[in-house]
Amino acid sequence: MASPPLVICGLDMNFFNLVMACLYFALFIPALVLNIVTVCISWKLKAKSAFIVYLKNLVVADLLMTLMIPLKALSNLPGASDGLMELDCHVSSLFYLCLHMSIILMGLISLDRFFKIVRPAGKLFGQSALFGRVAVIIIWTLWLSVNTIPTMMFNNVQPTTNNTAEVCMSIKSELGKWYHKIVTFECSVIFLVVSVVIGFCYLGIMKRVIESHRKSGNRDVNCRQKIKARVFIVLAVFLVCFTPYHIIRFPYVHHQVENKFNCHWASLKVAKSITLWMATSNVCLDPLIYFLLCKAFRKKLYEFKILLQWSSTSYQVNSHEVHL
């Protein structure tokens, strides 16, 4: 089933796939280290609000995505076995589940931060830990039952030809290909809605905080610049990681379903692969958002850093005593 070495319209697809595999391998180690540290810190946070519940679920989604990166890298290697490539097609459904859950959770976190700034004196029911738990359970369940599980079930066709441009399309039924288009459209709509929500929330937060500083008589320009920087870093991380992928994905899926080699498919394949890697790199950037938005996370990170320094110093002292 695996395709032979391909050069399409001047594009050496085998070489490109090798480059993508190397990029995924390069992403895996820092992503794994950052997310293990993040898990250790977030584990100690008490889920007293919806924000902490969303943050913990975002950490879980990022860690699961990180653990699936090696399979994505291996399946991109030239000469990857048919079984490995089919396995990646099945696991990719879980990968996209985590990716889009990250997008939705970032939207929920943005709404929570917005209402916290707008109503600092009171707490809405939507900001309670109970609401957060119910919301994430419903979202995880809906996405699994409506998108992920049906998509995996439709990967049930045995390919009859080696001349296939898209391995994952060759193992889908006709109904599966149609459903794949529907899911892609749904994901694009959700991304667009979340993008608008995040943009509205953070720009509103920035405006409210700057107005508050002015009313308090604080004319510190540096302070206002820091506020703007924090807001735009969050927006930049979200938009840079996810926007290119969702722009490319919709036209790509149309050619993907056709499952034919041509110049347009090859160019879209390259663009989709690069933008998907950019979206995956979000697992390394989300810890920055936790640090910027969550005071409790910053405090636990500082405690974790002190603990590591103490452990390192203790180990060095004990080693010195042994040598003596």
Image (cartoon, grey):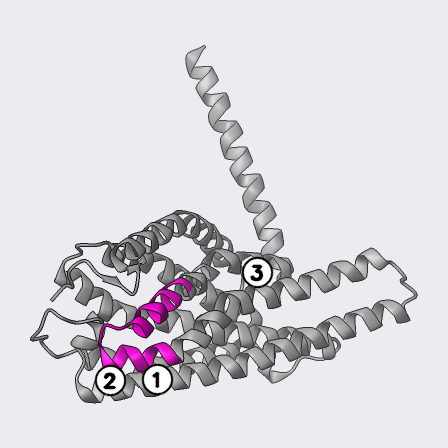
Tag 1's secondary structure?
A: helix
**Structural distance between the alpha carbons of marks 2 and 1:** 10 Å
x and y, in percent, of residue 166 in the image? 22, 71
Specify start and end residues of the magenta stretch as a single range: 251-274
Question: Disc 2 to disc 3, how far (Cα)?
Answer: 37 Å
Which quadrant of the view contains residue 136? bottom left
Q: Is residue 16 above or below residue 123?
A: above
Label 1 packing within 10 angstroms: few (<14), some (14-19), many (20+): some
- From the viewer's perspective, is residue 183 above or below residue 40? below
Image quadrant of residue 65? bottom left
Position of the N terminus by quadrant:
bottom left
Label 2 Cα neighbours within 10 Å, binned few <14 / some 14-19 / many ≥20: many
Callout 3 crowding tier (Cα within 10 Å): few <14, some 14–19, many ≥20: some
Which numbered marker is on residue 290? 3
Q: Is residue 8 left or right of residue 198?
A: left
Residue 80 image point, x, y percent: 18, 56
**Pointer 2 and pointer 1: residues touching (CB < 8 Å)?**
no
Kindly report which numbered mark, 2 or 1, lies closer to the viewer in this rendering. Answer: 2
Residue 167: x %, y % from top left: 19, 70
Query: Picture coordinates of residue 230 (x, y %)?
Result: 68, 61
Q: Is residue 102 magenta?
A: no
- The circle on residue 183 is 1
Residue that numbered label 2 is attached to: 177
Three-letter amino acid code at disc 1?
Val
Q: Are marks 3 and 1 in contact (CB under 8 Å)?
A: no
Q: Is residue 255 magenta?
A: yes
Question: What's the CA distance linking mark 3 and mark 1?
Answer: 29 Å
Q: Name the residue: 50% across, 28% down.
A: 314
Of pointers 2 and 1, the one earlier in the residue sequence: 2
Instruction: Examine the residues drawn in magenta and state their main secondary structure.
Output: helix
Question: Which residue is located at x 74 percent, y 63 percent?
Answer: 227
Image vertical order of residue 124 relative to residue 43, above or below: below
